Image (cartoon, grey):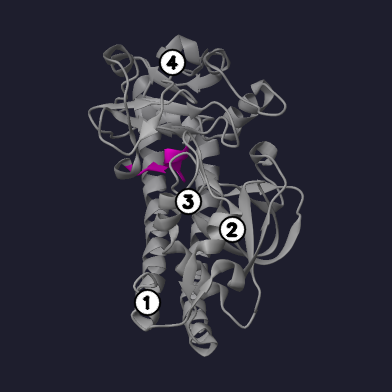
Amino acid sequence: MKDWKTVRLNEIAESVDYGVTTSATDHPIGPKFLRITDIQNGTVNWNRVPWCKCNTCSTVNSRLNPGDIVFARTGATTGKSFLIQECPKDAIFASYLIRVRVGALAEPRYISHFFQTPNYWTQITKSARGVAQPGVNATTLKELEIPLPPLEEQKRIADILDCAEDIRAKRRAALAQLDELIQSIFIEMFGDPILNPRQWSQMNLDAVFQFQTGKLDSNAAVPSGQYPFFTCSREDFRIDTYAFDCEALLLAGNNASADYSVKHYKGKFNAYQRTYVITLQDERNSYEYAIFVLEHRLSELKRISKGTNTKYLTLELLKRIRIPVPPQTLQKEFASRVAAVEKLKNAHKASLAELDSLFVSLQYRAFRGEL
């Protein structure tokens, strides 16, 4: 590491900027408007990113380019970063994000990989400000210390880590294909639950489920907590305490653009105060069936949401939703077929866990100059 040096981010950054304060819209009236909630599990689906209306000056100053790195500066995802590798020509970023654009001395991919390391997270944790809502600011980011080798070495390290990440991504893609297989089985057995082609009897949600909510703020998450912590984000979080010990569906109760999600979990967990914890009244029905039928109602939930800047769901709205309830024997058959696919998924997950462990080791060596 004789050619390496430790620098502060402001020494290698061309700019560190806050985003634009404006409202998102589903109508294409201006540039794409990237928000914290659009960054999920290290990816952005630009087709789902909304637009916004803003003046020309804001558009120019906040335009995103490949190579930019954006940071969540507040909330449960404080400090999480995302490297823009591709984006629409006209795309800007929201005020709860900070954009870092590195200069000629740094390779963006190398810097982005550093922002995933324990070294980075230790610095962020120490500097995060606030109690009720911890956050970081541009000044905090500028002071981050980064181990910096010569530019060509940065590129070599980034290539190695990119290759390792690509292998992990392929394993995650295999898992996604198995999820698609389960969806195909569902349609084969029950048909589209919106159209209800089998003419199953229909019931209101409150006749099928019991509803509770969590009690915690979204920033209660702990990075390496013992239990799952379900918020209104699609991303998974952890926490050190649990309030529930059961099988349940977890429905996001609010979302900036009403893009809700529903998850299934069995065991000890905790939940954000706007997350609905949903349990079956009759356990002879199937959670495996229930989650898919609710997922098919998410577009309806988006349509009937209340609120302006942040959309939300009330219990009264949920109670009015009707779903088909097929025979319990058919639900159980579906659950059995799902269990068979889940065995395959578990094998892939075990392999992915090994790859994740190897990646952490590789990452550790990379930033110590040992690759």
In space, the residues marked 3 and 2 are separated at their CA atoms by 10 Å
Direction left: furthest residue? 89
Residue where numbered disc 3 is placed: 260
Q: In the image, which is nearer the foreground, mark 3 or mark 1?
A: 1
The residue stretch that appears in magenta? 37-45
Residue 41 is one of the magenta-drawn residues: yes
Tell me residue 330's x, y (percent).
48, 87
Q: For the residues labelled 1 and 4, say whether their Cβ atoms are less than 8 Å apart.
A: no
Callout 3 secondary element: loop
Label 4 element class = strand
Q: Return the residue at label 4.
A: 17
Give percent across and percent down for residue 52. 33, 28
Q: Which residue is mark 1?
A: 196
Q: Name the foreground residue: 343 vs 243.
A: 243
Question: Of the residues shown, which amino acid type is indicated by label 1?
Answer: Asn
Q: Is residue 84 above or below residue 322?
A: above
Q: CA distance from mark 4 to mark 2?
A: 35 Å
- What is the three-letter code of the residue carrying label 4? Asp
Residue 111 appears in the figure: no
Question: Would residue 58 be visible to someone looking at this image?
Answer: yes
Q: Count residues near mark 3 (Cα–Cα under 10 Å), then give few for <14, some for 14-19, many for 20+.
A: many
Q: Amino acid at mark 2?
A: Leu
Report how far apart the C-alphas of labels 3 and 4 lie in the structure: 29 Å
- Label 1 or label 2, whichever comes before in sequence order: 1
On the image, numbered disc 2 is attached to which residue? 250
* Front residue of this view, candidates 1 and 154: 154
Name the secondary structure under disc 1.
loop
